[in-house]
Amino acid sequence: MTFRRLLGLPPVHRARVPPGYRVYAIGDVHGRADLLRPLLGWIGEDSAKRGAVEHVHVVLLGDLVDRGPASAQVIELLSSGDAPGRRHFLRGNHEEMMLEIIDGEVAAASNWLAHGGVQTLESYGIDPAPYWDDPEALPAAMRAAIPAAHVALLRAMLGQVRIGDYLFVHAGIRPGVPLDQQDGRDLRWIRKPFLGSRADHGVVVVHGHTIAPTVQFRHNRIGIDTGAYRTGRLTALGLEGEARWVLTSRLDLP
């Protein structure tokens, strides 16, 4: 008999994914194609070693672009379909900013450039220098240089994906708001109200957006952004049944 039963408390519900499912969630890539490519390979190898299941899902938690040197290569790799399982792409705050500028909303262009947009432009062969002073010309330059398939992938990104007892989002959720009523901006940008919450959300939220040195396992959330663009560590979380495990693609930086 457990202590919880002795105290008259209900048993703890352990989060799980449905039978026949294996899920991998990948944290913020931020232009690190050199880390994403081997991690996708290791996910395929890991899944093969664990045996066949009916459904393998790979969830990219957003912020594929900016900050790191190879955003174009990341999007090309994922556009090619060369990845294990069924893929789900979640939109991060950096994809949101990038799409806004492509669509002509240039008010935040300087902010985007200062927070990783410069590296994204360079990865597409665009010299960013002229656009600090002339942001109005930036949308046309981006539309000319970025392949249509890349823009289509960005536009098709989702706000959230639920699989079993896990909800996958980029940044987090607004505590106390029903999952089907969450605001998209919260899903992509929220930090403190979510990170500090001890509430039972009805699901375990798997998220990126906020960097930590290691995976953050909490009773109501799991944070897997290990800061790939600056630490050289890109992390994936594996889930099957009640089991959880971590894979890390690592390249030590000088």
Image (cartoon, helix red, strand yellow):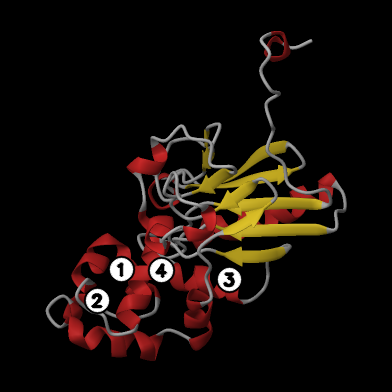
Per the image, the residue denoted by label 4 is 95
Asked if marks 1 and 3 touch (Cβ < 8 Å), the reply is: no
Q: How many C-alpha atoms fall within 10 Å of the one at disc 2: few (<14), some, or many (≥20)?
A: some
Q: At numbered mark 3, what does the secondary structure look like: helix, strand or loop?
A: helix
Give the Cα separation between the discs numbered 1 and 3: 19 Å
Tell me which label, 3 or 2, sits earlier in the chain.
3
What residue does disc 2 label? 128
- Residues under numbered marks 3 and 4 in contact, where contact means CB atoms less than 8 Å apart: no
Quarter occupied by the N terminus: top right
Q: Which residue is mark 3?
A: 77
Look at the numbered discs 2 and 1 and tell me whether their residues touch, using CB distance below 8 Å: yes
Q: Residue furthest left?
A: 133
- Judged by depth in the image, the label closer to the viewer, 2 or 4, is 4
**Given this view, does label 3 or label 4 mark the residue nearer the observer?**
4
Question: Is 193 rendered above or below residue 157?
Answer: above
Residue ID at (42%, 84%): 146
Q: Is residue 103 left or right of residue 136?
A: right
Please, what secondary structure does the residue beneath circle 4 have? helix
Which kind of residue does numbered mark 2 sit on? Pro
**Position in image of residue 215 (x %, y %):** 52, 37
